Image (tube, rainbow, N blue to C red):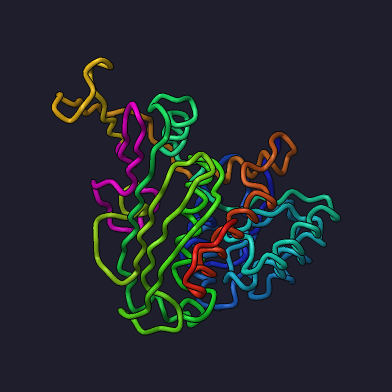
C-alpha cells in the first residue's frame, strides 16, 4: 500500500513525539506540521517537514489524507471538526474533548463527513497491557477481585508555563486520570460507579494536584486510583513502562491486579500464585513468576494502526464513541470531587 500522507497539528511534548514517530515510519509520510509557536519551526526542519503557523493554512495547501491533533484539550472539538470538514481522517490526542457536548459535535461531524476518528488512548497498544487484558478476560487469574493504581510524578515548574494546564480543565483529572480510567475500562470492563476526593493543597492552583478515586466495576470488582503531580516517586505509568524517553525510567510497578487464582504486577508482569490449587492460603508457599512479553513502542503501533484506519483496513481501536465513554466516567470523577458523593455512571 502507498504511504499515508499525514500532518501534525500541535508540537508540544506529545505532538513533537507524534511528529518524530511519523517521520521515521515506513507506513506514512510526514508532509507538514503546524504550531502557533514560531520556535517549533526548528522541529519541522529537523524532521524534514513543511512548517505552518496556522493549521488551517496547512490543511488547505497540503495534500493530506490524515492529521494527528495534539492541541490543548479545550480546542480538540473545534480543530477536529475543521479537519473533518476537509475530509481528513483524524488521530486526536485524548481526551476526545473537554465536555460531552463537544465530544458529540466531533463524533457527529466525523460521521457526516465520512472520516475515521481515532482517539489517542495509546496505552491500548502497549504489549504488556494487552497481555494483562488477555489474562483477565480469559480467566487465567481467576475471577477479578480488584485493581490498585498509583500515579505520582512531580511536574516541573516549566510544565505550567502553559497557563491552561493550571486552569479549569487542565488538571491531572483530565490530563492524567483519564488514561487510568481508559485502562481500567480496556482491561476490566464496564465501570458502574466512582467516588473521588481531590486536593489542590500542594500547589494551590485553580485545579487539583492530587486525587483519590474509588471505582466499582460492573463485574463487582473494585479499583482504587491515587494520582498526584506534586510528589516525586518511582510509581507512575510513564516512568515504569519506558514508553516515552522524555520521562526518567523506573524499574518499579504501578498497577497491581488481584484475582482469585493469581495476582499480577504491571508493567513488569510479575504473576503471583499458589503452586497447588488444593493448598491455597496464607500459610502456604507462593510463587512469583515473570511473564515475558516482547517490547513494542505503543506510539509507533498506534500510528501504524492509524495508517491502516485511514486506508480502511482496520476500524479504530478507540472510536469516538468509546472515548466518549471514558470521558463521561472521567467527568463523573470530577463531579464526585465537587458534590462529595459517589456518582453512578
Residue nearer the viewer, 9 or 188? 188
Residue 102 lies, in percent from the top left, at 71, 67
Please say whether residue 332 is one of the residues in the magenta stretch. no
Q: Is residue 156 above or below residue 281?
A: below
Q: Magenta segment, which residues?
A: 242-268
Find out whether residue 262 is within the magenta segment. yes
Name the image quarter holding residue 200. bottom left
Left or right: 125 as drawn, with respect to 117: left
From the top left corner, tell me how far across and down residue 55 is, in percent. 68, 70
Residue 18, position as x, y percentages in the image:
53, 55
User: Is residue 61 something one can see in this rendering?
Assistant: no
- Give the answer, above or below, for where 272 lies relative to 65: above
Q: Residue 322 vs residue 142: left or right? A: right
In the image, residue 37 sits, relative to residue 110, either above or below, namely below
Residue drawn 32% across and 35% down? 264
What's the residue at 65%, 58% (across, down)?
Answer: 7
Magenta highlight: main SS: loop
Residue 96 image point, x, y percent: 63, 60
Q: Quadrant of the C terminus?
A: bottom right
Quadrant position of the N terminus in the picture: top right
Residue at 30 percent across and 39 percent down: it is 265
Is residue 195 shown left or right of residue 38?
A: left
Picture residue at 53% right of the left edge, 42% below the top: 186
Amino acid at each position: 500500500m502507498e504511504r499515508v500522507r499525514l500532518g501534525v497539528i500541535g508540537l508540544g511534548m506529545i505532538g513533537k513525539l507524534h511528529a518524530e514517530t511519523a517521520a521515521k515510519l515506513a507506513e506514512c509520510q510526514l508532509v507538514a506540521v503546524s504550531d502557533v509557536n514560531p520556535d517549533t519551526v526548528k522541529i519541522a526542519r529537523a524532521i524534514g517537514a513543511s512548517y505552518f503557523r496556522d493549521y488551517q493554512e496547512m490543511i488547505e495547501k497540503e495534500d493530506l489524507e490524515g492529521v494527528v491533533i495534539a492541541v490543548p484539550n479545550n480546542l480538540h472539538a473545534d480543530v477536529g471538526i475543521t479537519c473533518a470538514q476537509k475530509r481528513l481522517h483524524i488521530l486526536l490526542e485524548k481526551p476526545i474533548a473537554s465536555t460531552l457536548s463537544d465530544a458529540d459535535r466531533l463524533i457527529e461531524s466525523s460521521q457526516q463527513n465520512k472520516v475515521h476518528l481515532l482517539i489517542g488512548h495509546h496505552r491500548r497498544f502497549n504489549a504488556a497491557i494487552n497481555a494483562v487484558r488477555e489474562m483477565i478476560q480469559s480467566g487465567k487469574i481467576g475471577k477479578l477481585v480488584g485493581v490498585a493504581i498509583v500515579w505520582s510524578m512531580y511536574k516541573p515548574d516549566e510544565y505550567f508555563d502553559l497557563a491552561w494546564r493550571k486552569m479549569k480543565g487542565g488538571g491531572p483529572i483530565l490530563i492524567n486520570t483519564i488514561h487510568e480510567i481508559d485502562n481500567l475500562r480496556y482491561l476490566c470492563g464496564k465501570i458502574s460507579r466512582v467516588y473521588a476526593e481531590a486536593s489542590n493543597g500542594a500547589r494551590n492552583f485553580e485545579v487539583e494536584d492530587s486525587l483519590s478515586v474509588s471505582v466499582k466495576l460492573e463485574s463487582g470488582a473494585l479499583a482504587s486510583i491515587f494520582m498526584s503531580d506534586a510528589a516525586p516517586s518511582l510509581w507512575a505509568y510513564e516512568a515504569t513502562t519506558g514508553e516515552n524517553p522524555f520521562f526518567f525510567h523506573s524499574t518499579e510497578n504501578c498497577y497491581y491486579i488481584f484475582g482469585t487464582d493469581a495476582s499480577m504486577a504491571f508493567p513488569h508482569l510479575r504473576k503471583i500464585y499458589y503452586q497447588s490449587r488444593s493448598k491455597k492460603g496464607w500459610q502456604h508457599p507462593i510463587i512469583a513468576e515473570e511473564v515475558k512479553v516482547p517490547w513494542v513502542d505503543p506510539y509507533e503501533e498506534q500510528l501504524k494502526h492509524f495508517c491502516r484506519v485511514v486506508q480502511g483496513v482496520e476500524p479504530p481501536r478507540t472510536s469516538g464513541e468509546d472515548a466518549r465513554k471514558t470521558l463521561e466516567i472521567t467527568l463523573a470523577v470530577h463531579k464526585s470531587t465537587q458534590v462529595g458523593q459517589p456518582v453512578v455512571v
